[in-house]
Amino acid sequence: MTHLLELRDVTASYGPVQALFGITLDLGEGEVVALMGRNGMGKTTTIRCISRLMPHSAGSLRFAGRDVAGLSAPKVARLGVGLVPEGRRCFAPLTVAENLTVAARPGPWDMARVCALFPRLQERMGQIARTLSGGEQQMLAIGRALMTNPRLLVLDEATEGLAPVVRQEIWAGVRRLKAEGLSILLVDKSLTEIASVADRAVIVERGATVWQGGIADLTSDLTDRYLGV
Ligand code: ATP
């Protein structure tokens, strides 16, 4: 079976410091996969390699049937990797509407659909992004990625640091995206929410995949061993 995203034994370094020692990960079309692991284990670095914000050193990394090794970040974005980076980055001085418009690429996702997913954005169309709440900025960051009409949405810690009620709005949005058939790779710390939306999980420890399987097979033994504090 060919997957939308396939990583095989991917390694990567920050200068002399090796961060990834062998990440293997598969994500099929329409699947939601959770990339899990304790702090500093290599989740964000893996996402940076997938979106070509940094090169990998060895192993293979394929998206939509293509080896992405030689491709630039904008090229991979055009191929359909929609990244929502950690820290909910938007263009701070631009309005909500401008943020969404500059990201737009042809496809089924447009401003109306993003607003249907996150109605709060509709109410804030003319507001400068910098003045939004953290949760609204996160919704805008997800909205921007959707406006690119991605084949794969990559969410890095999308609910980090948000109030519980706002987290629930984000998770409701993610569940809706899954129901609509979007492929999603997500990093998050909330096991309960991950269990409610992910099809499969990949656990990383010290920069290497140590477990990959169906979400129903993610036992408390595994979570205690690899995710416990
Ligand atoms: P967190 O949940 O805390 O974001 P993570 O699993 O996403 O953690 P990474 O951010 O990928 O982990 O970090 C993996 C390793 O790479 C860590 O040992 C980290 O210290 C190191 N690292 C991350 N960014 C850099 C950098 N810019 N320069 C050097 N080392 C880095």
Image: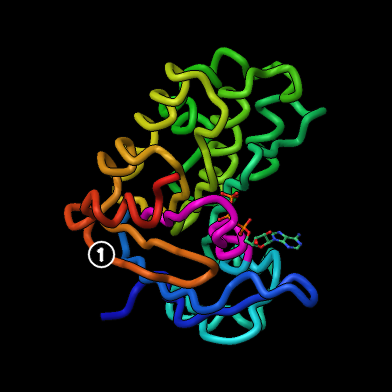
- The amino acid type found where label 1 is placed reads Gly
Q: Point out residue 144 in the picture as x, y percentages from the top left corner.
A: 59, 40
Q: Identify the residue at image location x=54%, y=54%.
A: 82
Q: Point out residue 23 in the picture as x, y percentages from the top left corner.
A: 48, 74
Whether residue 37 appears in magenta in the rendering, the answer is yes
Q: Identify the residue at image location x=48%, y=72%.
A: 208
Q: Point out residue 101 in the picture as x, y percentages from the top left corner.
A: 66, 37
Q: For the magenta stretch, what is the residue range?
A: 33-48
Quadrant of the image occupied by residue 12? bottom right
Instruction: Say if 69 sits above or below 43 in the image.
Output: below
Type of colouring: rainbow
Q: Nearer the viewer, residue 116 or 67?
A: 67
Quadrant of the image occupied by residue 26? bottom left
The image shows a total of numbered marks equal to 1
Q: Where does ligand 1 appear, by image quarter?
A: bottom right
The residue under label 1 is 213
Q: Nearer the viewer, residue 157 or 185?
A: 157
Q: Identify the residue at image location x=80%, y=74%.
A: 15
Instruction: Say if 125 sits above or below 178 in the image.
Output: above
